[in-house]
Image (cartoon, helix red, strand yellow):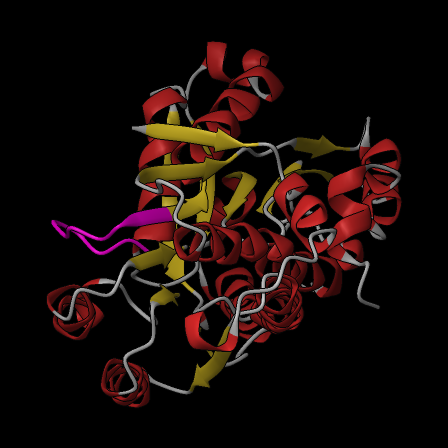
Amino acid sequence: MKKVLGLFLVFVAAVALSACNSADDTKTIAVIMPSADHGFLGESINHAEAATQSLAEADGYEYVFLISDDIVQQSSQIDQVIADEVDVVVLWPHNGDELKSAAQQIVDAGIPLIIYDRLISDFNETAELLGDNVTIGEETGTYFNEYFATELALGTVNILEFKGDNSSVPTQRHDGFFTTADDNFNVVQEYSTNWSKDTAQSQMETFLSTDTQANVESIQAIFTHDAEVAAGVLAAIEGYDGSYTLNIKLVSAVSASRELLALFDHYEALGIDQVAFAFSPAMVVDAIQLGIDVLNGETVSGQYLVATEMVDNSNFEAFMAGPVYTLRYSLD
């Protein structure tokens, strides 16, 4: 069953609680995440660590907060929290399916498990919470259809796609996009960036400098899966000094970061529009709240989806004054 959460309202309510359990009844929540290899994860860690402490202490629970550099280290952390007999685990896997065996040990130990962000296929966790990645892809496709309506009526519109990695997240966004996108969109090249701005910039620079003139000049849009990736692509486009005539009109992104939004006017002046679909690092708080709900004896089950919000040149300033953006940068 899918449940769409009103973004982060649970966090505000939970922090206001002051109930305390007796020492004999103290329970422990363990939160396990990847370490920060890009800005979004860094922001997520900051929100997760602050929320784990605040939410646990508000209800008198103990907490363990762990980050890891790779799957091997994360698996070892899972072994440890099982041995320590924690009462609930919130897990952001490095890659869902590669952590399946370790995650199964949590379930086999009878510990409730909340999976965050990256799905584990064919797995029976207590609950999972993630951004609505399929809808993000679908709405991106719909936006592209409307933006290029005239060009699509005339024939093929060539684009590039810059994904994040091989996890469930980009797979869902890609599949969602091509569910709604017009059949006349043609992906000339597809890249995996590992969510890196520098990697995306290098890949785009290589395409512009080494591909054929016909291909380079035919590209009208870039479909990216992340704000940092989009920033790298845009930097490569702006820095291009070759002899080909670029015709890129639109660059999309996921996660409406302030760094990207600050450049909307700049790139619009250069003839490039942008659209981003909100995907905030602060939504990890909702997954931690589900873990606290389990400790409080509440029923938690199924898939919880955090709704997205479209942000483009027409509304980005209003978005920056709104609650999702404000909460994202509330720890600064």
Q: Is residue 278 visible?
A: no
Task: Say if 92 sits above or below 262 in the image.
Answer: below
Q: Residue 148: x percent and y percent?
A: 57, 20
11 vs 269, left or right, is: left
237 vs 152, left or right, is: right
Helix, strand or loop for the magenta stretch, by majority: loop
Q: Residue 291: x percent and y percent?
A: 43, 57
Foreground pick, 31 / 154: 31
Q: Is residue 194 visible?
A: yes
Q: Is residue 190 magenta?
A: no
Foreground pick, 104 / 177: 104
Write the residue at 44% across / 37% down: 305
Q: Is residue 126 magenta?
A: yes
Task: Say if 117 sits above or below 308 in the image.
Answer: below
The span shown in magenta is 118-128
Q: Residue 259: x percent and y percent?
A: 78, 59
Foreground pick, 222 / 205: 222
State the image quarter where residue 231 is shown. bottom right
Q: Quadrant of the N terminus?
A: top left
Foreground pick, 286 / 273: 286
Q: Quadrant of the C terminus?
A: bottom right
Task: Say if 85 sits above or below 170 in the image.
Answer: below
Write the residue at 29% across / 67% down: 95
Write the residue at 70% across / 58% down: 18
For the image shown, how many numbered marks are present on the structure? 0
